[in-house]
Image (cartoon, helix red, strand yellow):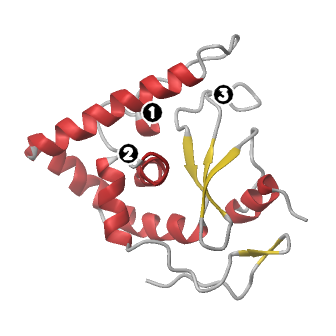
Amino acid sequence: MTNEKQTVEIQLNRKVRSNIDVVTKCHFDLPVVVDVPKNLDDGTPFPTMYWLTCPMYVKKVSTLESNGMVKNLDKQLVENKKLNKLWRKRQKSYENERNKKYKSLSNTISPIGGVGGTTKSIKCLHSHLADELVSGKNVIGKIVLESLGGCNCNEPCVINGSKNDKWRIEW
């Protein structure tokens, strides 16, 4: 039987650099989002509590980013005061949640900023979507999720500890 960390490594196609906890799963009971500690095993600060592992979401969000969605949303943050206020509120609450969660750890470096470690721009739609899928509090993540239409895989991406070669992304 494959443990969740191994499944995530298959999904990401690389080794995971710290202990993780799966916090959101898909309809195939596979990891979608993992909780990552504020410092990786080598001590590197890691500002993102929630990391998107689902290959479908990762690929779709990458497409949105390459089509300019980060730039578009950053522009909306300047033009739309309500959106900006909601984004700033989540950035601050995210930072507070992360710092409170790990405040008892000594000999660690605390990351700064909110989702994705940012303070002035969006930077990474993947991290905003991951936060929205876990918390339901991320206005940018909600916009991303609405743009994607949710999880629609017809087959699991991982089967019996191996990448499923029949798995395909569908829009």
Q: Which mark is residue 117?
A: 1
Tell me the distance, in whole angstroms, between the alpha carbons under discs 3 and 1.
13 Å
Tell me the distance, in whole angstroms, between the alpha carbons under discs 1 and 2.
9 Å
Determine whether 161 is above or below 109 in the image: below
The quarter of the rendered structure image containing the N terminus is bottom right
Mark 2 residue type: Lys
Determine whether 71 is above or below 107 in the image: below
- Element marked by disc 2: loop
At horizontal 59% and vertical 67% (from top left) the residue drawn is 26
The image quarter in which residue 21 lies: top right
Q: How many marks?
A: 3
Check whether the beta carbons of the residues at disc 1 and disc 2 lie within 8 A of each other: yes
Check whether the beta carbons of the residues at disc 3 and disc 2 lie within 8 A of each other: no
Answer few, some or many: residues within 10 Å of disc 1's Cα (few below 14, many 20 plus, some between 14 and 19). Answer: many
Q: Position of residue 48 (x, y in %)?
A: 53, 38
Mark 1 residue type: Gly
Determine whether 4 is above or below 77 in the image: below
At horizontal 66% and vertical 73% (from top left) the residue drawn is 28
Name the mark nearer the viewer: 3 or 2: 3
Q: Position of residue 125 (x, y in %)?
A: 40, 53
Dot 3 or dot 1, earlier in sequence? 3
The image quarter in which residue 17 lies: top right
Dot 3 or dot 2, earlier in sequence? 3
The one nearer the camera, 157 or 23, is 23
- Element marked by disc 1: helix
Q: Which mark is residue 81?
A: none
Q: Position of residue 74 (x, y in %)?
A: 23, 47
At horizontal 85% and vertical 69% (from top left) the residue drawn is 161
- Pointer 3 residue: 39
- Pointer 2 residue: 123
